[in-house]
Amino acid sequence: MIDEISSEQLLQQMAEIRDSLSIEDTQQTDDVQQVDQEFGEVLGQLIDDVDQAQKEADASIQELASGEATSLQDVVMKMEQAEVSFKLMKEIRNKLLDAYKEVLTMQS
């Protein structure tokens, strides 16, 4: 035999589910904020590293032009390192934009 369901019991169960979801949502929001902060720090560090590589390459070119640097190989190596790090950062940016667009289309 099926027990009768009262509206009060149903409302109470719905309230319990809502409260449990609110607690989980709060925890998930905190986790997401922490991940966002860590992700932002990683991207910031990547940008700083690329910027530093670019500055070192520029400085080595200036040293070579002024006659202070005698090793053409070191200059070329720094230039290649700066170029590769920039390409990596650009590819990461492109992948992030693609993922963002995909999320937007999923929400529509």
Image (tube, helix red, strand yellow):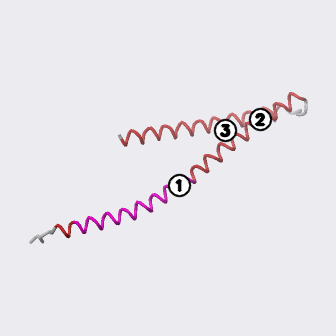
Kindly identify which residue carries mark 3: 85
Name the side, left or right, on which 20 lies relative to 37: left
Kindly identify which residue carries mark 2: 57
Asked whether 25 falls inside the magenta stretch, the response is yes
Q: Give the range drawn in magenta.
A: 11-37
> Helix, strand or loop at disc 3?
helix
Alpha carbon distance from label 1 to label 3: 24 Å
- Crowding at mark 2 (Cα within 10 Å: few <14, some 14-19, many 20+): many
Which is more N-terminal, label 2 or label 3?
A: 2
Kindly identify which residue carries mark 1: 35
What kind of residue is marked 3?
A: Ser
Res. 65 image quadrant: top right
**Pointers 3 and 2 in contact (C-beta within 8 Å):** no
- Magenta span: helix, strand or loop, mainly? helix
Q: Which residue lies furthest to the right in this view?
A: 67
Pinpoint residue 99: horizontal percent, then vertical percent: 47, 41
Pinpoint residue 84: horizontal percent, then vertical percent: 67, 36
> Helix, strand or loop at disc 2?
helix
Which is more N-terminal, label 3 or label 1?
A: 1
What kind of residue is marked 1?
A: Val
**Pointers 2 and 1 in contact (C-beta within 8 Å):** no
